[in-house]
Image: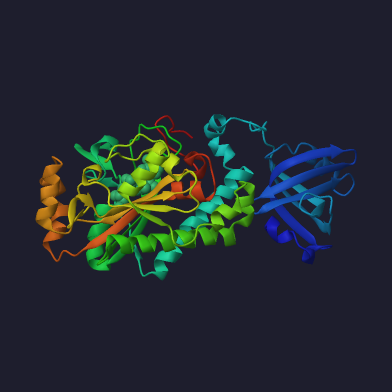
Amino acid sequence: MHIRDILNDSHVDSVVKARGWVYRSRESGRLIFIVVRDSTGIVQVVVEKGAVSQEEFEIAKKASIESSIEVEGKCSKEPKAVTGYEIHASRIKIYQIAENFPITKDKSDEFLLDIRHLWLRSREMTAIMKMRETVLDSIRGYMKENDYHEVQPPMFVGGMVEGGSTLFEVPYFGEKAYLTQSSQFYLEAFMYSLENVFTISPSFRAEKSRTRRHVTEFTHYEAEAAWVGNQEMMNLEEDMIIYIARQLLSSNRDELEVVKRDIDKVRAVEKPFYRYRYEKVIEIGRQKGLQLSDASDLGEKEERTITEDFDKPMFVYNFPTQLKPFYHRPDPEDTSHVLNHDVLAPEGYGEVIGGGERIWNKDELIGRMKEENLNPEDYQWYVDLRSFGSVPHSGFGLGVDRLLTWLAGLDHINKAIPFPRTIRRLRP
Ligand code: 4AD
Ligand code: MG
């Protein structure tokens, strides 16, 4: 029985069993109060001298924080107990008496990262992991409702997608392989059979930048759809983000409270999102004091300044062609810009999605590669896809960890990931 299920009137006066870990305990004469935690909640247990065997009473005294424990006893209503109910132990068993738990109040973020294998069981991390699950469930729910098929692309790949500077190289039986930066090209291959596809897979970037939103391994939710244009793709993303925000509000009130999220900020995620051309956003940035050229790339700092006082996400579309990878389709009416978009989350969080229309004409694709000094032969199979019934198509990639960081109002992407990987962190 889980603790959550014990905490209601229907169990009052009946015998219940709880097991989990010692959250805290204190002794007071003939009584020992032990708060037990499991994955669903906490409950107070009272161990009274005489109500259990002498041996059990002695063991209960040793129930240090995080000891693993099982208790059985009558449940009663107790307004003074932490969650309103109390178990009067008639039997108690300790599986392991925990050593001195290293986590006490007010430890630094860095220390908590060093012992993430233990910090994972904190109230905060437990709440965040539950919200993460809701985000992933909602993505799957939303995509199924919209007739998208989930697929599994490979993680070992032979080439780059998003530029050479962040590629992780891995030895591969005498050949060079890379950890995938994005599954986009593979989704484009799947598209010819399944039309609308998505994946939730890891992507890897050898990011040297140490910002509050960069990690080297992140959970990438990517989608690709045949016959869809840039603006239409944005419509789907807008509905999808709203869907996820609502699911969080309905399934994770308690967890949002644990992380002290201002619920109104999540409620504000409503249609329509802002939709601005790239140039308009540059103008907004300048008004806010940023030094920006006509084709500035927007980094963490710029996006933070731009989105700080926004209440809803913002689409930034049609970037200058030179800022974006070769696969983006140049606007046929103005080839100096591509038919792409980013989604910037409000409150300073910045980019959570990059997406857009792909070049679907083979010669145009080869032409753009050459302009970027890339060798089309290195992308043989990707180019080959344009030889057999090519169609217009669009897609996007959303950083799940970034989305959760924003929706949960966290101050660093590290907090949204169970075991974050950065340039300086490979353990635990
Ligand atoms: O903007 P990016 O680089 O776009 C692509 O990879 C496209 N091929 C996606 C596609 O169209 N299928 O990455 C997409 C998103 C970013 O908006 C960001 O949310 C996340 O992936 N992302 C990262 N998240 C955490 N740490 C990093 N180092 C990230 N790099 C990208
Ligand atoms: Mg991007």
| Residue 209 spot, x, y in % from top left | 37, 32
Q: As displayed, is residue 24 above or below residue 328?
A: above
Query: Total label count?
Result: 0
| Residue 145 spot, x, y in % from top left | 42, 70
Nearest to the observer: residue 65 or residue 144: 144
Quadrant holding the N terminus: bottom right
| Quadrant of the image occupied by residue 115 | top right
| Residue 248 spot, x, y in % from top left | 55, 58
Q: As displayed, is residue 130 above or below residue 197?
A: above
What residue is drawn where x is 34% and y is 40%? 298
Q: Is residue 401 left or right of residue 128?
A: left
What residue is drawn where x is 63% and y is 45%? 123
Nearest to the observer: residue 338 or residue 362: 338
What residue is drawn where x is 77% and y is 44%? 34
Asked whether the viewer can see residue 128, the reply is yes
| Residue 71 spot, x, y in % from top left | 75, 51
Q: How is the image coloured?
A: rainbow
Asked whether the viewer can see residue 216, the reply is no
| Quadrant of the image occupied by residue 384 | bottom left
What residue is drawn where x is 25% and y is 63%? 191
Outermost residue on the front side: it is 287
